[in-house]
Amino acid sequence: MIDESLLNRLIEEMSSKGAEYAEARYHSIVRTSIIVLNGMVIGVGKEVKEGIALRAVAEGGLGFASSTSLNTEDALAAARRAVMAAKTSAKIRRNPVRMGSARLGRAKYSVVEREPLDDVSLDDKVKSLIEEYKALQLEKNGFKVSSLTLHYAESMETKVVVTSDGAHVESRVPRVVVFYNIAASNGGKQANRFFELGGSGGYEVYRGFNLAKQIQDDIESLYIALTRAGSPPKGWMDVIVSPELVGLIVHESAGHPSEADRVLGREAAQAGMSFRSYYKEERIGSEHVTVVDDPTIPGSLGFYLYDDEGVAARERVLYDHGRLAELLHNRETASVYGVESNAAARAMDYESEPIIRMANTYMKPGDYSFEELVEDVKHGVYIKKYMEWNIDDVRWGQRYVGLEAYIIENGELKQPVTNVVLETTTKNFYSSIDAVGKDLKFYAGICGKGEPAQGVPVWMGGPHVRLRNVYIG
């Protein structure tokens, strides 16, 4: 941990060198990982990333520097580099950088570990993963799982953020994530399933995954796809989309295009653009569609109460009953738009500057049960799990391929099908929704963005939704 007086001194140093705004962030991540392949441990590691990140606004430019050393002289040198970088960048900027006003915090918070990560030995964690593997049924009637990789990762993220205009926020967030990849075959057919589970908290998060049951369910989906599933239907029909796919869709086609830096064109060379840069209509979907991003959900993988600029977090409404609503802002883009920052600035580590990021993006649930959604479909398809997807650079045209899906006839689920292709546009998808389920579920992910690339933990989710008369190819 850092002596906080050093952060205050760094703020003073940057201010004395001409910074109108100065920001110092101590950022530490201690991460432990275990990799198990087909029941055998192939890797165990521990990584500590600790350092100081510094930003300065001077003469209308923005500069960033970092230091892995917590030595006072090294940190002061980095502070001076941040100011120098700001003054240099000011010479080539068309418009000066300004940090808008915001609800800044002076707070200290920590996610409570009901079962502290350090209280469970590494040996016990390894043993648990191996036992989960041994509990699985991996072969049936010619079908077999040829490869199963489990990757357990736990981390403790500690931050102290101090700004020259009054923010002072300390935070401590433990997280647990499990990735797994299943490769299966049946005769000459092959398929795979990659999935991720995650949340904030202690080892109780891992126990709550019920990992063997979760993996066995995905093995069964692969079994169905490779042994029983027929060819997908084609044509115009009603489609019910599962929470798993809804979560991915809202992340990609509501969350990313609502990032203000994308809308301003600043991400064009790194991660793409946004249709919200030029889309002039107020409505993007039906009245049943509300999509929000909320960092404050307890236990979520993307949890935080203050962002990396010291701004208090809250729910951000991106699509409001089918209408375009908020953008995700940091203090800089909020100033451009004449609004207040809604606390979307996040950095992956001390070597990274805060950029606009999602946290937990999801579609608000409605009132329908799954049975009610299905019973009103005469001819259609239910897409339960997906295997691949893609979306264009402006987050408009998109395509999703189902791994496990079922024909719907006269309000009943019938035979399984696979390789169902839903190809649509953002407006068509959200406008086709006529009913939204009440079964809200969340899914974990690591969201990538930026140059150099930054990956940050997120949740994405939603309920089942029903689409009317969309094209399945």
Image (cartoon, rainbow, N blue to C red):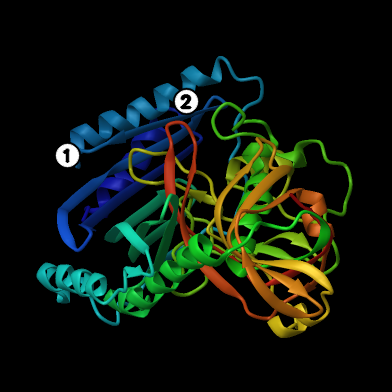
Quadrant hosting residue 78: top left
Precedes in sequence: disc 2 or disc 1: 1
Q: Residue at x 45, y 34 (%)?
A: 56
Q: Position of residue 436 (x, y in %)?
A: 75, 74
Mark 1, other Cα within 10 Å: few <14 / some 14–19 / many ≥20 = few
Secondary element at tag 1: loop
Residue 253 visible in the displayed image: yes
Q: Position of residue 90 (x, y in %)?
A: 54, 20
- Name the residue beneath numbered marker 1: 71
Residue 173 visible in the displayed image: no
Question: From the viewer's perspective, is 259 left or right of 126?
Answer: right
Mark 2, other Cα within 10 Å: few <14 / some 14–19 / many ≥20 = many
Closer to us: 315 or 133: 133
The label number, if any, that marks residue 86 in the structure image: 2
Q: Amino acid at mark 2?
A: Ala
Q: Position of residue 72 (x, y in %)?
A: 19, 39
Closer to us: 244 or 97: 244
Q: Residue at x 24, y 46 (%)?
A: 49
Q: Position of residue 262 (x, y in %)?
A: 64, 38
- Contact between marks 2 and 1 (CB within 8 A): the answer is no
Question: From the viewer's perspective, is 48 left or right of 429?
Answer: left
- Count the marks: 2
Cα–Cα span, label 2 and label 1: 23 Å
Q: Is residue 462 above or below residue 451?
A: below
The label number, if any, that marks residue 83 in the structure image: none
Q: Amino acid at mark 1?
A: Asn
